[in-house]
Image (cartoon, rainbow, N blue to C red):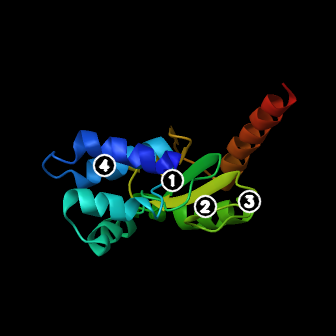
Amino acid sequence: MSTSLAAVRAVLARRADEPGALLPILHEVQDQLGCIPADAVPEIAGALNLSRAEVHGVITYYHHFRGEPAGRHVIQVCRAEACQALGAEALLTHAERRLVCRSHASSSDGRYTLEPVFCLGLCASSPAIVIDERLHARISPAAFDRLIGALENEDAEEAAR
């Protein structure tokens, strides 16, 4: 049995009997493994007496869930109305070029995952982004480049140690 399948089964053993267990199980599996592996879907479906299609449907409905592990850094760009009104679409396009990464995908070197999201709760300070779970407000393309440059410097320092 693979390590990831063992982790999925441990989560199922703890949570399968909870009411409405599917979403908490998917969150916990992704938190532990960084994604929801394809071979986890039949395990989860069987434990919850659901079809594989039902579990797959939930995984693909919510953009939060991933079938592949995320890149080293996860960058989320808010695309809700307030952020769109203040340039989020242009910022997302800029991010795709800067990171050499399409939306909902990871860069070829595995360094970045770029995720458009809806409403980070900073509507008064739009456009907003999250980098590795840290919120940043009023982000211009230049500010975005500074934040990514700081990440690159941190990564270089860490690699030099």
Q: Which residue is mark 2?
A: 91
Q: Amino acid at mark 4?
A: Ile
Q: Amino acid at mark 3?
A: Arg
Q: What whole-number distance in Å separates the C-alpha atoms at marks 2 and 4?
A: 34 Å
Q: What whole-number distance in Å separates the C-alpha atoms at marks 2 and 1?
A: 8 Å
Q: Is residue 61 above or below residue 12?
A: below
Q: Which residue is mark 1?
A: 127
Q: Residues within 10 Å of mark 1 (few under 14, many from 20)?
A: many
Task: Give the percent coordinates (x, y) of residue 79.
Answer: 46, 62
Q: Amino acid at mark 2?
A: Leu
Q: Residues within 10 Å of mark 2 (few under 14, many from 20)?
A: many
Q: What whole-number distance in Å separates the C-alpha atoms at marks 1 and 3?
A: 17 Å
| Badge 2 element | helix
Given residues 7 and 141, the one toward you in this image is 7
| Badge 1 element | loop
Q: Which residue is mark 4?
A: 25
Task: Give the percent coordinates (x, y) of residue 81.
Answer: 39, 63
Q: Is residue 122 left or right of residue 149?
A: left
Q: Which residue is mark 3?
A: 98
